[in-house]
Image (tube, rainbow, N blue to C red):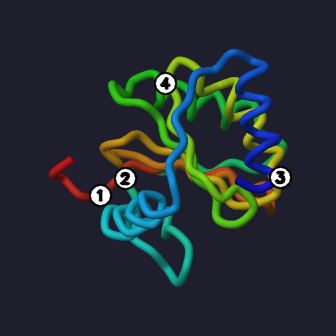
Amino acid sequence: MNDYDKEFTTWLNSEKISYETIEQSKHDKLIYSINRAFPFSGSKIDWSKTKNSLSFNTQNKDKALLAISQKAADSTSKIIFIGDSLIHLGYKIKNTDILSVLAEVFEIPQHNYIFPQDLSWIACLSMEGDIDMGDSPIQDR
């Protein structure tokens, strides 16, 4: 666990948000599953090829985080958060805790991916300030 993970788990504990950590081996499997469930252009999700895609910028941050939390509230499974660099572990939280967690995650300078266990949709909070969300184009979810 690195300093960013320690800081994030300390914050989760202080907010009394229950969570499970996802170790590196399972984290790598999640990346593989994301690559199979969503279209990519290079190393990024091709949001134009996802279903019901939404894109926001930092000026619409609150609207974007609310849209993601509403999507999470409709999910019956826990929500997973993984990052692409600074946070080494993945985190699984209850869908009801997503809005407060999103605001904290947005401050971590990396690409942050948020999705339910079934990968029916995914959101990305980029370190450049872009916020994207889309449903998986794969029908068998």
Mark 3 — residue?
Answer: 3
Q: Label 2 to label 4, Cα distance in Å? A: 21 Å
Disc 1 secondary structure class: loop
Q: Quadrant of residue 98?
A: top right
Disc 4 secondary structure class: helix
Say few, some or many: other residues with alpha carbon within 10 Å of mark 2 (under 14 / 14 to 19 / 20 or more): some
Three-letter residue code for mark 1: Pro
Disc 2 secondary structure class: strand
Q: Label 3 to label 2, Cα distance in Å? A: 36 Å
Mark 4 — residue?
Answer: 95
Say few, some or many: other residues with alpha carbon within 10 Å of mark 3 (under 14 / 14 to 19 / 20 or more): few
Q: Position of residue 112 (x, y in %)?
A: 65, 53
Query: What residue lies at 47% left-to-right and 31% top-to-bottom?
Result: 71
Query: Can you tell which mark lies on residue 137?
Result: 1
Q: Are marks 2 and 1 in contact (CB under 8 Å)?
A: yes
Query: What residue lies at 50% left-to-right and 68% top-to-bottom?
Result: 45
Nearer-the-camera pick, 70 or 8 = 8
Give the mark nearer the N terminus: 2 vs 1.
2
Three-letter residue code for mark 2: Lys
Mark 2 — residue?
Answer: 51
* Location of residue 67 with respect to 133 vertically, above or below: above
Give the mark nearer the N terminus: 1 vs 4.
4
Q: Label 3 to label 4, Cα distance in Å? A: 25 Å
